[in-house]
């Protein structure tokens, strides 16, 4: 079955996918380079992946905290807002984009995350759908390249042809990510559903937010890898 072509919503700005924000427009203008849509989409994906540090310790589920433009302002983000930024930058560059979500089992977690979340399942992990040459292609701009190189992860490369999703194993062959549930793709971030799922799945997270934000994710991962 052929995929349904995008409608106007896949190019429109929203409160959370704020593709009309000046910082997003400037980012797209700078990084959406290439001879065709595929090359521009790949360039944008790598720019979002590598120019903004992945940090799951600084989760802010407020509207302001989850906006695409907030990743640019902060210089870091976790998978959901980074996916929103890629979608926003793509729309600003004229490339139809959606945000998609899945629940994943993360086999490379940290002691702090396991203690706080009380599970190795990360609900509503975010990725981006990009419309390229008549098909939706999945791109996952979460882990910056420095994080992958430092901790033995296979980078999430994107060529605009194949879907770019989490690898099941790391470079050493250890289990890494496992997709356990798909939520599908959306024209806008379903923030209320994400907040509800986090509250139900991670009841201790809100009480630990301040301690998490004060911690160093990369230092914790380093200790985990050295065990």
Image (cartoon, rainbow, N blue to C red):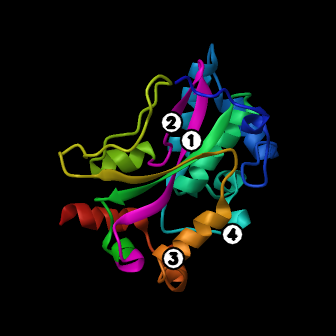
Give the Cα separation between the discs numbered 2 and 1: 6 Å
Q: Which residue is mark 1?
A: 128
Is mark 4 in CB contact (under 8 Å) with mark 3? no
Mark 3 or mark 1, whichever is nearer to me? 3
Q: Categorize mark 3 by other alpha carbons within 10 Å: few (<14), some (14-19), many (20+).
A: few
Q: Tag 2 or tag 4, which sits nearer the N-term?
A: 4
Q: Tag 1 or tag 4, which sits nearer the N-term?
A: 4
Give the Cα separation between the discs numbered 3 and 1: 25 Å
- Residue 60 showing in the rendered view: no
Residue 201 horizontal/vertical position (percent): 46, 74
Q: Residue furthest bottom?
A: 207
Q: Categorize mark 2 by other alpha carbons within 10 Å: few (<14), some (14-19), many (20+).
A: many
Q: Tag 1 or tag 2, which sits nearer the N-term?
A: 1
- The dot on residue 200 is 3
Q: Is residue 149 in the magenta section?
A: no
- The dot on residue 138 is 2
Q: Residue at x 42, y 63 (%)?
A: 122
Mark 4 or mark 3, whichever is nearer to me? 3
């Amino acid at each position: 079955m052929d995929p349904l072509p995008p409608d106007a919503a896949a190019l429109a700005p929203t409160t959370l996918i704020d593709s009309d924000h000046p910082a997003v427009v400037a980012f797209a203008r700078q990084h959406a380079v290439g001879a065709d849509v595929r090359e521009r989409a790949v360039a944008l994906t790598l720019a979002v992946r590598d120019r903004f540090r992945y940090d799951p310790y600084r989760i802010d589920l407020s509207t302001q905290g989850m906006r695409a433009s907030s990743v640019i302002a902060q210089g870091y983000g976790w998978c959901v807002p980074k996916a929103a930024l890629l979608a926003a930058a793509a729309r600003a560059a004229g490339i139809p984009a959606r945000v998609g979500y899945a629940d994943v089992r993360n086999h490379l977690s940290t002691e702090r995350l396991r203690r706080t979340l009380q599970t190795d399942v990360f609900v509503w992990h975010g990725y981006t759908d990009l419309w390229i040459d008549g098909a939706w292609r999945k791109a996952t701009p979460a882990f910056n390249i420095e994080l992958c190189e430092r901790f033995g992860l296979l980078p999430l490369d994107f060529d605009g042809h194949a879907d770019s999703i989490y690898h099941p194993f790391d470079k050493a062959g250890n289990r890494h990510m496992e997709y356990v549930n798909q939520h599908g793709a959306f024209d806008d971030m379903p923030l209320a559903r994400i907040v509800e799922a986090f509250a139900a799945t991670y009841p201790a997270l809100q009480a630990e937010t301040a301690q998490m934000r004060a911690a160093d994710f990369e230092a914790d991962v380093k200790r985990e890898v050295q065990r």
